[in-house]
Amino acid sequence: MKESIFNANFPRDEEERVYHISVRKGEVTNRVITVGDHVRARKIAKLLDTEEESGHPVFEKLSQRGFLTITGRYKGVPVTIMAIGMGNPMMDFFVRETRACVEGELAIIRFGSCGSISHLAPPGAVIVPSAGYCVRRNIDYFADEPLYPELKDKPYLFSGNFKADEKMVNILSNTLQSAISVLENESEYVGPVLTGGLNVDGCSFYSSQGRIDPTFWDDNQDLMKEIVMNFPKTHSIEMETSMLFHLARCARDPTKPIKAAGCMQVFADRLANGFIRPEVVALLEPVVGKACLDALIQVDIENEMSSEGTVWEKSSK
């Protein structure tokens, strides 16, 4: 650690940068696309307006903890693309610290990958959930002396549903439908776009997503069946999108609301144990990334930040 940090409750450095994603006010816009890895973020960033078109350079910041922030304009509209890694904790860092750096309403679209537990969504499909819930490994269940004996028969705990923003879901779904329809005519391995179901977030890639690993004591052999029985409208399973919806729901400052939507490319067929082909990813990913940008700039923002003093302020030259 090179910087002096202040405020142990919500750490910032001397430049007012937040602790994990290392950005400050004026470096993140009101419209954000979040992805998992840097490669996907940089590919999407190639679609941003050039410095000549936007009147300012594209801003880029890589934090010591691996969060990549890219801010510029797309078709003249300020947008941010952020790579955050995988899992609920990374989503928590991203949402809370981004919210602390943005004034006014915050709109977030997550673009990721997922497993499918619906025969309607094979590898190469794109899922846009209307809501999501979470499955958590009950750590206490595996303890020698559990503190909660009433949960002794529950190795995994389920939450209720958290809704995505309905208007954003409709915009994202319609934009994706138009974009993917062209590819569907070119390749039998792309599509469809499946909207209106549920997403489930596991707290891990393995145990809480029902993957069987004989090396570990997981007691998850019935978990996938339990998911389908409890939530029959579940289409997708991954680790971030439901957490995003949950945090948007829990943002309680009325002057700083969060609205969110998400889409995921189906990589893994959890029913037939299949996986997407690399050439399909190469075909699908650029189209979905562009559709996310096209959808994001259609989202209305209340009390949007002024560009004055920001990294997307146009040069006076």
Image (cartoon, rainbow, N blue to C red):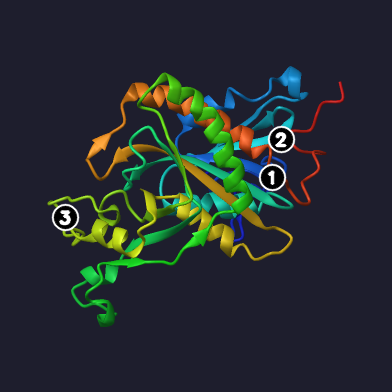
Closer to the camera: disc 3 or disc 2? 2
* Camera-nearest residue between 155 and 161: 161
What amino acid is labelled 2 in the image? Pro
Mark 3 or mark 1: which comes first in sequence?
A: 1
**Helix, strand, or loop for circle 1?**
loop
Is residue 225 visible to the viewer in this orientation of the structure?
A: yes
Residue that extends furthest to the front in the rendered view of this protein: 185
Marker disc for residue 216: 3
Instruction: Assign the C terminus to one quadrant of the image.
Output: top right
Residue 63 in sight in this render: no
Label 2: few (<14), some (14–19) or many (≥20) C-alpha neighbours in 10 Å: many
Q: How crowded is mark 3: few (under 14 residues within 10 Å), some or many (20 or more)?
A: few
Q: Label 1 belongs to which residue? A: 30
What residue sits 68% from the left and 29% below the top? Answer: 74
Image-quadrant location for residue 189: top left
Which residue does the numbered mark 2 point to in the structure image?
78
Q: How far apart are marks 2 and 1 (CA)?
A: 8 Å
> Which secondary structure, mark 3?
loop
User: Label 2's element?
Assistant: strand
Residue 205 located left or right of residue 16: left
Pick the residue in front: 121 or 214.
121
Q: Distance between the residues labelled 3 and 1?
A: 43 Å
Residue at 68%, 43% in the rendered image:
299
Relative placement, left or right, of 295 versus 305 is left
Residue furthest left as drawn: 214
Q: Distance between the residues labelled 3 and 2?
A: 47 Å
The foreground one among 260 and 25 is: 260
Q: Where is residue 32 in the image (x, y as percent from the top left)?
A: 61, 41
